[in-house]
Amino acid sequence: MTGGGRRVRWKTQRHINRYREIIRVLIKHGFGEFLDRSHLGRLPGRSGRLSGEAAEGKRRTSKWVRIRHVLEELGLTFIKFGQIMSGRPDILPPGLILELEKLQSQVPPFPSDQARRIVEEELGSPPERIFARFQEKPTASGSIAQVHYAELPTGERVVVKIQRPDLEEIVTTDIEIMHLFASLIERALLRGQALNPSAVIDEFGKSLRREIDFTVEAANIRKFAHRFRNNPRLHVPRVYDELSTRRVLVMERVDGIKVSDLRALLTAGADPRAVARSGAEVVVEQIFSHGFFHADPHPGNILVLDRNRVCFLDFGMMGFLLPRHRQILITMMLGLVQRDEARVTRGLLDLSLERAPVNQEALEYEVFELIDRYADQPVKSVNLGELLTRMLRLVVEYHIRMPPGFFLLAKALVTIEGVARRLDPDFEMVNSVEPVVRRMYLRSFSPENLGKELYSVLSAAGGLLRELPADTREIIGKIKTGRIILRLDPADLLPMLRKTDQAANRLSFALVLASLVVGSSIVITAKIPPLWSGVSIIGIAGFLGAGLIGFWLLISMLRGTKIGGL
């Protein structure tokens, strides 16, 4: 059972039961009419309309709140989907995003005998044979896994992250049903619209499958540790690869204070201002220096250690940026700091995944207005998170399709700025961003980077030259045999026709202008009455008209607009 218009197949009774549960929850929260319109209520053993069935809370709460309640009641997969979509203002309205940001997954721990069984299945031996000590009662429990404290025979203290039973099967079933929902919605409600729910589900499915595969998280931690191995402000927990699998992850136990516990930080002698600065600068460095960053740096995922060091937890959701996108973002951030609206606008358009027509002048004006709003404020009053949120709204308004990593980046910066300002109300996020961005910008002009860029250009040119003779021979052969077919899209001809029309209008006005100048000169020379101080008034009026037309023509050419609206 998949999306994109493929045939729906009910694989197991589990699929049917889960589908019925989803329908029941949607009806309960007042979405029966939506089920009727989208045909989502059609399933084995059920017929008839659903909109008239009873719904708790219907009409009493907003539809955004009811959507949040639906996702919370349906569990892990749907909660994760809502949390990820809360960072997609290009798809969802602001009111729904505010509700999705409140999503919480409060899941009770699963029995310790199941945890022991999973450890034995994954590592080949029961916990007591692997660990010197294994704490039966979990220390923490989440929607994906729960954590048990343990100690290795060598005396090292570790945490054992154990995945919830049957999680992969649950996620697979839910994503397949989501695909079905997406395909039905596309056919019933979104015909001809650009929004593609099936593609969104595909992207989400890949992200969630990576998050529930602990070998991916272990690889993320190793990569993170390698890239920040010389950073004294950051501690990355060690991973015990020989004891880690897809469903079990064994890591160094890190004892620290949650970054949200300000009282405990002060009691321990930590400096909240230094912690705020360290945490923010580390996230900024992750994004702009490495293009590999923790995508969810909320307070529960950050510990504070001695000497104001920070330690990030839960590396299941990471953001990635291509080097080219990173360079564009660096240029944009410098444009924001320097209040250069043209640079920011060019960056937004360069980041776009699709070169759809955009009114660049109008977009640049909006960016200027946005930057100017903060121009007279002191640096500490500039909320970078708010600025990025407004920028995202512009992206949505102008239908600019951005890389997925851009939205994770924005969410990460907004989250860490909020954490830092809790620790230090006077924290200035701009001051943390600017030095890193400026350093990376200058590094792009280093001889090493310029050499790499030159080598890349020459390699591409060399490949083109190697392929040119064969391609030319093929084209000539097709011309000789009459196999060259030229296809023209009328939509592609419109810009050319407009340009031609514009040039013709300007030429016509130029001829009128020249005629006025020549005619007025003849009238003045012939002294055709009425006269004013011996000069023909008609001739003067002709020269004034010619001057106005000439000025209008000059302004329109400079602005690149059409004359007379033609």
Image (spheres, grey):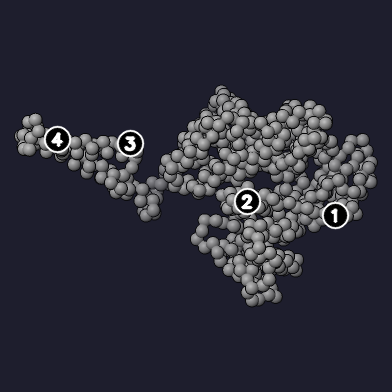
Q: Position of residue 418 (x, y in %)?
A: 67, 39
Q: Earlier in the sequence, mark 3 or mark 1?
A: 1
Pick whichever, 79 or 261, lies toward us: 261
Residue at 63% over, 60% down: 63
Left or right placement of residue 479 versus residue 453 in this view: left
Distance of label 2 from label 3 (alpha carbons): 43 Å
Query: Where is mark 1, residue-wise?
Result: 110
From where the camera sits, is residue 199 visible? yes
Query: Where is mark 4, residue-wise?
Result: 540
Residue at 64% over, 73% down: 52
Q: What amino acid does circle 3 point to?
A: Leu
Pick whichever, 70 or 223, lies toward us: 70
Can you tell which mark lies on residue 268? none
Pick whichever, 434 or 113, lies toward us: 434
**What is the quadrant of the N terminus in the image?**
bottom right
Q: What amino acid does circle 1 point to?
A: Phe
Contact (Cβ within 8 Å) of mark 4 with mark 1: no
Badge 3 marks a residue whose secondary structure is helix
Q: Single out the residue that lies furthest toward the top.
A: 447
Q: Earlier in the sequence, mark 2 or mark 3?
A: 2
Q: What amino acid does circle 4 point to?
A: Ile
Query: Where is mark 2, residue-wise?
Result: 97
Q: Position of residue 452 (x, y in %)?
A: 56, 29
Distance of label 3 from label 1 (alpha carbons): 71 Å
Q: Position of residue 355 (x, y in %)?
A: 48, 46
Contact (Cβ within 8 Å) of mark 1 with mark 2: no
Label 4, residues with CA under 10 Å away: few <14, some 14-19, many ≥20: some
Distance of label 1 from label 2 (alpha carbons): 31 Å
Left or right placement of residue 492 versus residue 125 in this view: left
Of badges 2 and 3, the one in the foreground is 2
Query: Where is mark 3, residue-wise?
Result: 558
